[in-house]
Amino acid sequence: MSAEPCTSVPTVKICGLQSVEVLKSMINLPVDQVGFVFATSKRQVRADQVAEMISFIRAQDTFRPVTVGVFVNPQLDELIDLLKIAPLDVVQLHGQESAEFCQAVKTQCAVQIYKCHSLRESSNPDSVSDSWDAYRDVIDALILDSYDPVYIGGSGKTFPWERIAPYQKWAKEAGIPLIIAGGLHPGNVHELLDRIHPDGVDVSSGVETDGVKDIVKITAFVERVKQQ
């Protein structure tokens, strides 16, 4: 059974950006969010690199995507110090961060919070409400990604999309967007949108060639989402 259609065009997040040059190549595309990985990863960036990219974005008139920093179990003081250098719009938490920690970051850093959940085979779909109700009224979006013991996102692996339904129901009840990540690319994003109707999609390795962001693939991905 298909999910209830989303009434608006899904948002697009291009994650794992590492240079201003890639941003320049995307300047004419309707990209809603861009992500920078601060966690240990092959796409990891420093605060000063991200500061340069944010400065470029804020200097544009029409290309103004929301800036998202990806972290795994960070310390609050670490985030406070980093955001003084790289003033992100959103902190995306990809680890085991509690609802209380999310609230503390949101309050003390004046940012939105995206919480990412990596779906494991052992995840119990019947416990979604119990597991996530503490995050209600705290987080600003829920992201579902593939679980990988090595990579923090960007693994290029999909997860069974039929497992999305209880999370989608919870996010709708909580009044926040559900964003799907994990193994998306220009060749499969249309199927996801037709079947699941998420509020947004998040891509990293699926728009790369040999580990480098590929503007041809980025363009194809964005067009296939926005032409729904």
Image: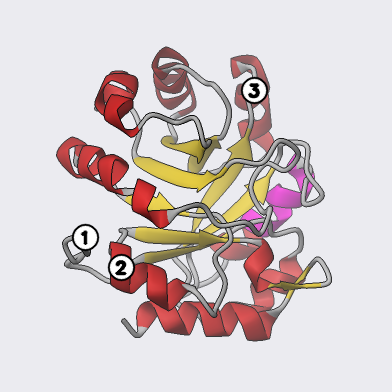
Question: Residue 88: x and y, percent?
Answer: 55, 43
> Pointer 2 and pointer 3: residues touching (CB < 8 Å)?
no
Q: Which colouring convention does the figure follow?
A: secondary structure
Q: Which residues are magenta?
A: 47-54
Determine the CA span between mark 1 and mark 2: 6 Å
Q: Nearer the viewer, residue 95 or 75?
A: 95
- Which residue corresponds to mark 3? 74
Question: Residue 112: x and y, percent?
Answer: 41, 37
Would you say the magenta stretch is mainly helix, strand or loop? helix
Looking at numbered disc 1 in the image, what kind of residue is underneath it? Ala
Determine the CA span between mark 1 and mark 3: 34 Å
Question: Does the magenta-highlighted stretch encompass residue 50?
Answer: yes
> Pointer 1 and pointer 3: residues touching (CB < 8 Å)?
no
Q: Residue at the location (47% across, 16% down)?
A: 101
Query: For the residue carrying disc 1, how many other residues have a C-alpha within 10 Å: few (<14), some (14-19), or many (20+)?
Result: some
Q: Quadrant of the N terminus?
A: bottom left
Q: Which mark is residue 195?
A: 2
The reply, left or right, for residue 63 in relation to residue 103 is right
- Which residue corresponds to mark 1? 3
Question: Residue 187: x and y, percent?
Answer: 54, 80
> Pointer 1 and pointer 2: residues touching (CB < 8 Å)?
yes
Q: Which mark is residue 18?
A: none
- Of labels 2 and 3, the one closer to you: 2
Looking at numbered disc 3 in the image, what kind of residue is underneath it? Pro
Residue 27 in sight: no
Q: Earlier in the sequence, mark 1 or mark 2?
A: 1
- Callout 2 secondary element: helix
Residue 8 quadrant: bottom left
